[in-house]
Image: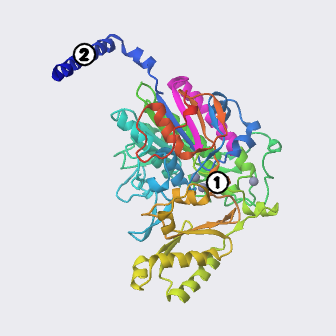
């Protein structure tokens, strides 16, 4: 009785399958293409060091086709934050695309102290691969240190490796980490005397012809020209005076004021590298991204491709001139124009409504502390040398040796565990004693130990951000938090890395296929982006994703 029921069900199933097969056979391929619910291309854009308030501060200067098009056609998440510390470029790019935090993807900094090899390592560095497109070691890079997948990786798996993933950025880590492990390619810019886009043997044995053609087209040379403001500088009322004491500027030019003759200045500023710290670095990135779309036929069929583009110049300009500079304002006005050009290109090559774009940042940045103190806001600079001297005296007096500490980097103290053992000390006691000592230092506001991070679950506050950024295997023994707006940096320009709002609050815009029009002040976090894109594509989430699907942005 049972057996025959199973048989009947089975034959019914077979009939259904057959019917479905004939139905599929009878429609032609173009119809499938038209009814495909997925975008043909997903473009992920990261603007390096973009604070949320740039969207609102420079609003009056933006055109209708760039940032404003994303807002008027798409969805604006106005209260979007990083939910971990440290807010650096490597962790930022990894978190956007893996949908999780350093605790899981393992990119705990741009550089960090490797406890096994006992040396500093670079997040994208890989000595086992070779440079492609240059003799320089700048191409010896891969995503090997990132421990989880990106949504681009998952799309590769989902499409049986037919959907392409390509990563592009002036910075190697801005191209490599977003694209992921199974990417077809990642390209980044090598300046100096070469000015060309390069890659690594992790992806390929030789640059494709279109990249070689782009490199010989003198595209980079064409941007070694004058940099002046797009509009009359007198109309740039949203930023501070052009001449002030808070800016770095270029070598070979006394004042950090417009105009800048980039061709003349390039000799003293590492050749083509000068382009990185000007808005033209972003224009060159957009040019290269469009060349990639064309040559690689991205978004030309129903199988979704993924293109990741990171605009790095905004970060270099912010570090050099500070977040309140005329130079930053002009850089964002010009980026807005590059975005407009890029979206128009996507309209004509992929088709309006056939692609999906999101735009966010890898971190924000602090106002120049000297500027903040000039308007009476608490801020300042850390005196690392004095701190280290005081600390060494403590170590000598308490343990008889300074060698008990192996490394101090990224506001973390790494203990020499062998030494702790050899001295017959208890690791947890040493962590606690050092934490207490550090807390007595000027401008240190909070201190936690690795043991606390591993044994307590924090759901709110700075502790939760530290925990999301903490890797048991890779992070240090003692973790320091500095006072608000206190930085380890030169006296000019801005930087980032903290868990404070100026570093965590960044734009999150979605637009294009499958995206609703709207906006929200509900809090969203960076790891929500990759699950949301994965849901839109109907693919598996990145394997370590911890973020949530932002269902309200999906149409
Ligand atoms: Zn960055
Ligand atoms: Zn200036
Ligand atoms: Zn930076």
Q: Position of residue 145 (x, y in %)?
A: 41, 56
| Residue 308 in picture, x, y percent from top left | 50, 40
Q: Is residue 95 above or below residue 320?
A: above
**Which residue is found at the position 70% from the left and 55% from the top?**
321
Residue farthest to the top, as pictured = 26
Q: Main secondary structure of the magenta part?
A: helix
Q: Position of residue 17 (x, y in %)?
A: 27, 17
Q: In the image, 90: left or right of 368?
A: left
The reply to whether the magenta stretch includes residue 347 is yes
Relative to the observer, which residue lies in front, 110 or 169?
110
Quadrant containing the C terminus in the rendered view: top right
Q: Which mark is residue 503?
A: 1
Colour mapping: rainbow
Q: Is residue 155 visible?
A: yes
- For residue 553: magenta? no
Quarter where residue 488 is shown: bottom right
Label 1 crowd bin: few (<14), some (14–19), many (20+), radius 10 Å: many
Q: Residue extending furthest front?
A: 1
Which region of the structure is painted magenta?
Answer: 331-360
| Ligand 3 neighbours mark 1 (CB distance < 8 Å) | no
| Side of 113 relative to 285 (left or right) | left
Q: Earlier in the sequence, mark 1 or mark 2?
A: 2
| SS at badge 2 | helix
Q: CA distance from mark 1 to mark 2?
A: 59 Å
Name the residue: 78% across, 61% down.
377
Work out whether 351 lies above or below 418. Answer: above
Please give the residue where the numbered disc 2 appears in the rendered image: 12
Locate the N terminus and report the quarter of the image it occupies: top left
């Amino acid at each position: 009785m049972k057996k025959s029921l199973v048989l009947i069900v089975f034959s019914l199933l077979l009939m259904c399958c057959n019917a479905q097969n004939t139905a599929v056979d009878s429609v032609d391929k173009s119809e499938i293409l038209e009814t495909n619910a997925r975008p043909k291309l997903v473009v992920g854009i990261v603007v390096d060091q973009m604070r949320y308030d740039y969207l609102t501060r420079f609003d009056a200067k933006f055109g209708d086709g760039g940032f404003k098009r994303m807002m008027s056609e798409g969805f604006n998440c106005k209260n979007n934050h990083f939910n971990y510390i440290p807010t650096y470029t490597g962790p930022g790019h990894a978190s956007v695309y893996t949908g999780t935090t350093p605790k899981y993807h393992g990119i705990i900094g741009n550089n960090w102290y490797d406890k096994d090899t006992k040396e500093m390592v670079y997040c994208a560095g890989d000595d086992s691969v070779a440079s492609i497109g240059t003799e320089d070691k700048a191409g010896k890079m891969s995503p090997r240190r990132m421990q989880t997948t990106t949504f681009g990786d998952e799309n590769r798996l989902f499409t049986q490796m037919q959907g392409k993933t390509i990563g592009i950025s002036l910075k190697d880590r801005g191209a490599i980490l977003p694209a992921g492990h199974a990417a077809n390619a990642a390209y980044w810019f090598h300046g100096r005397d070469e000015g060309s886009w390069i890659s690594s043997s992790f992806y390929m044995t030789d640059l494709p012809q279109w990249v070689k053609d782009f490199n010989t087209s003198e595209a980079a040379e064409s941007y070694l020209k004058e940099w002046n403001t797009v509009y009359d500088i007198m109309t740039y009322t949203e930023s501070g005076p052009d001449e002030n004491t808070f800016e770095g500027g270029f070598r070979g030019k006394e004042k950090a004021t417009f105009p800048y003759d980039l061709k003349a200045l390039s000799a003293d500023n590492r050749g083509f590298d000068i382009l990185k710290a000007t808005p033209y670095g972003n224009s060159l990135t957009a040019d290269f991204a469009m060349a990639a779309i064309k040559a690689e036929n991205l978004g030309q069929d129903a199988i979704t491709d993924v293109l990741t583009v990171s605009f790095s110049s905004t970060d270099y300009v912010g570090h050099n001139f500070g977040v309140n500079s005329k130079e930053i304002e002009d850089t964002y006005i010009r980026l807005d124009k590059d975005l407009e050009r890029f979206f128009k290109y996507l309209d004509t090559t992929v088709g309006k409504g056939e692609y999906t774009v999101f735009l966010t940042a890898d971190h924000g940045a602090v106002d120049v502390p000297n500027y903040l103190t000039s308007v009476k806001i608490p801020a300042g600079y850390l005196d690392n040398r004095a701190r280290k001297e005081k600390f060494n005296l403590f170590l000598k007096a308490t343990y008889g040796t300074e060698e008990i500490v192996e490394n101090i980097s990224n506001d973390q103290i790494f203990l020499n565990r062998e030494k702790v053992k050899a001295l017959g000390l208890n690791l947890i006691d040493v962590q606690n004693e050092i934490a207490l000592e550090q807390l007595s230092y000027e401008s240190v506001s909070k201190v936690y130990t690795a043991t606390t991070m591993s044994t307590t679950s924090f759901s709110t506050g700075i502790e939760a951000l530290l925990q999301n950024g903490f890797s048991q295997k890779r992070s240090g023994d003692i973790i320091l938090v500095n006072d608000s707006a206190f930085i380890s940096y030169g006296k000019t320009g801005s930087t980032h890395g903290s868990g404070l709002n100026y570093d965590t609050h960044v734009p999150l815009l979605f637009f294009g296929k499958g995206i609703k029009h709207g906006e929200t002040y509900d809090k969203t976090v960076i790891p929500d982006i990759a699950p949301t894109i994965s849901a839109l594509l109907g693919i598996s989430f990145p394997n370590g994703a911890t973020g949530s699907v932002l269902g309200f942005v999906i149409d």
